[in-house]
Structure formats: C-alpha cells, structure tokens
Image (cartoon, rainbow, N blue to C red):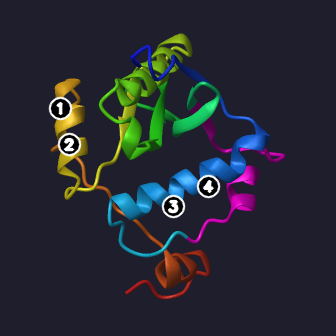
Amino acid sequence: MIDEARGQAVIRPAEPADVPVLHRFIVELAEAEDFPGEVSAEPRDVERALFGDRPVAEAVVATVDAEPVGFALYYPTYSTILGRPGIHLEDLYVRPEWRGNGLGRALLAHLAEVAVRRGGARLEWWVLRTNDPALRFYRRLRARALDEIEVLRLDGDALRGLAGGGPTG
C-alpha cells in the first residue's frame, strides 16, 4: 500500500487526541471538494459526536510512521427491507500528497470489513456529482449509483417549522 521509502500505513480507531487533526481533515476535505458553504462544525462538535456520552459516529485514522494522513468517519444504518444493519460513510479523506498509494481503498476495505463483521449488508455513502475523481475511484471498486432514490433534506427554517408544527408550505 505504501512504498518502503514512505513507510507502512496503519488504520486504527480514532482516539480523543485525534480530534484536532480530524477537524482539520474535515475542513481540508470540504475545501478540496469546493463544498458549498463553510464548515460550521468545531472540534468540540467532532469530539462530542465520536466520544461524547452518546456517540453518534465512529472514525478511523490512517497513519504512516505515526503521522495521520487520512481518515474515514462513519455511522450505523439499518435496512428494514433487508432486516440488517449497514454503515454510512460520511467522510473519506486522504491528504493529497498521500493519494495514489492505496490508502483510500484500504480505508474503504477496512469499513467493508467492519460492516461484514457486524452482520451488515451495506456500505453506503454520498458523493458530490462534481467530484469526478472520487466517482471514478468508487466505480473502479464496483460501487453503484442508486437511481431508485433521491436524497432529500430538511434543515434551517423548514426543519424548525416542521418541528414546531407550523406551516410547511
């Protein structure tokens, strides 16, 4: 996965001490994808999500010679149709200078192993339609796009309006 001159990659569970680097990677990922809007998550939000009283996500960190070079953040899902759990990959990131060495594939393979070990039937994620390099990478792994669903979202005023029982349109 990594050439001998650059060391061997290790994928390990994230620890609380990783929160600052995870947050930095999240910001770098958003910038690299030209993600619309700014990252409003703060390191304390990442820490609470991963290590708080009720963690809602998990993460793994890819390191080379103990230097963090990438990560994957994910959370459990459940399919009522299949009656089995799955994993939703929220973020996958490898620093630009470490791409092309198999780290992205290794991170996805690690998550696939986690899903299978937990009895899962799926590993799913969303990709910006404008992220052509990622789409090509995922297609090489035989990931398929879902034509049968649309991703929908309620946020901001629409979310608060529905939660408050107010008019929705």
Residue 104: image x %, image y %? 38, 31
Mark 1–mark 3 Cα distance, whole angstroms, equals: 25 Å
- Most foreground residue, 10 or 110: 10
Which SS class for mark 4? helix
Residue hosting label 3: 27
Residue 23's disc is: 4
Q: Which residue is pictured at 17% across the width and 49% down the height?
A: 132
Q: Which residue is mark 1?
A: 139
Q: Earlier in the sequence, mark 1 or mark 3?
A: 3
Would residue 84 be found to the left or right of residue 100 on screen? right
Q: Which residue corresponds to the image point at 48% horizontal and 15% vertical from the top-left?
A: 113
Which class describes the residues within 10 Å of circle 4: few (<14), some (14-19), or many (20+)?
some
Q: CA separation, marks 2 and 3?
A: 20 Å
Q: CB atoms at circles 1 and 2 under 8 Å apart?
A: yes
Tell which circle, 4 or 2, labels the residue nearer the N-terminal end: 4
Q: Is residue 66 magenta?
A: no
Q: Residue furthest right?
A: 53
Kind of residue indicated by mark 1: Arg
The residue at the point 56 percent across, 16 percent down is 118
Q: Amino acid at mark 4?
A: His
In this view, the mark in front (4 or 1): 4
